[in-house]
Amino acid sequence: MKTIGLLGGMSWESTVEYYRLINELVKARLGGFHSAKCLLYSVDFTEVEDMQRREAWEESAAFLGAAARSLERGGADCIVLCTNTMHKVAAMIQAQVRIPMLHIVDATAGAIKARGLQRVGLLGTRFTMEHDFYKGRLAELHGLEVLVPGAEERAVVHEVIDEICLGQRRPESRARYAEIMAGLVAAGAQGIILGCTEIGLLVRPEDCAVPLFDTTQVHAAAAVDFALEGE
């Protein structure tokens, strides 16, 4: 079994889910007392959130790259960046280590294409919904059509993510997400990407008429596939 390097803390609420899911999947695959071999480097999220607000992407790449190098030195065989938004600097982080990063967009695209879907809605932070690093990779590398909510709805989606990161699970926020997802479905979305690792802590499959792709679950499964390849 290979060792998974988890680069988390963005937020710790969703990093907990990564650790749980990865270990549950390893146990399901191997049985008995098996659990995952993994290392965790958990950052102080306020530092990363400050860089996001300032859009200091090169600074954040250096910060997260140092953490990735620590995981590599510790014996990790891969890097799993436990956040969607900071995949904006994934290539810059990858350039700082020799071990592979398992890209969350590629794992998500694989799950979508396995269901035979072509047009999907995307929810996430404003950076994920508005910048091209996520939508562009889905479209250009994987041939998927991506829909995002309108400007006012994008602001709501981003604000609710902040709530979840602070441990809040508001029924009214879940209901608002259901309305936004219904709008994307009405616009032609065949599935919805929960493109922030916190959203799956609030939204449930019954909140939407089409399949939901929880990127935390999909990314964790990709990490286990990598770790157990050849087992």
Image: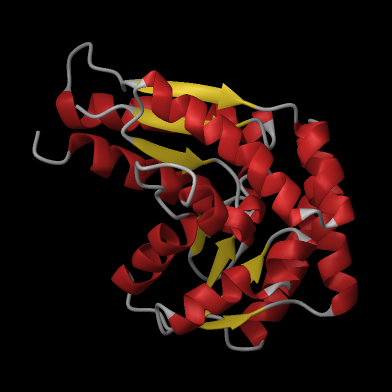
| In-front residue for pair 81/168 | 81
- The image quadrant that residue 184 belongs to is bottom right
Q: Is residue 170 left or right of residue 18?
A: right
Q: Residue at x 47, y 55 (%)?
A: 104
| In-front residue for pair 66/197 | 66
Q: Where 174 sits versus 135, above or below?
A: above
Total marks in image: 0
Residue 210 locus on image (x, y percent):
52, 71
Task: Please say whether residue 23 is visible from this viewpoint.
Answer: yes
Residue 166 locus on image (x, y percent):
82, 33
Q: Residue furthest top?
A: 33
Q: Quadrant of the N terminus?
A: top left
Q: Residue furthest left?
A: 230
Q: Residue at x 88, y 52 (%)?
A: 53
Q: Is residue 124 left or right of residue 37?
A: right
Q: Is residue 157 left or right of residue 114?
A: right
Q: Quadrant of the C terminus?
A: top left
| In-front residue for pair 196/192 | 196
Q: Residue at x 65, y 30 (%)?
A: 9
Residue 131 locus on image (x, y percent):
71, 72
Q: Residue at x 80, y 60 (%)?
A: 157
Q: Where 106 sits versus 162, above or below?
A: below
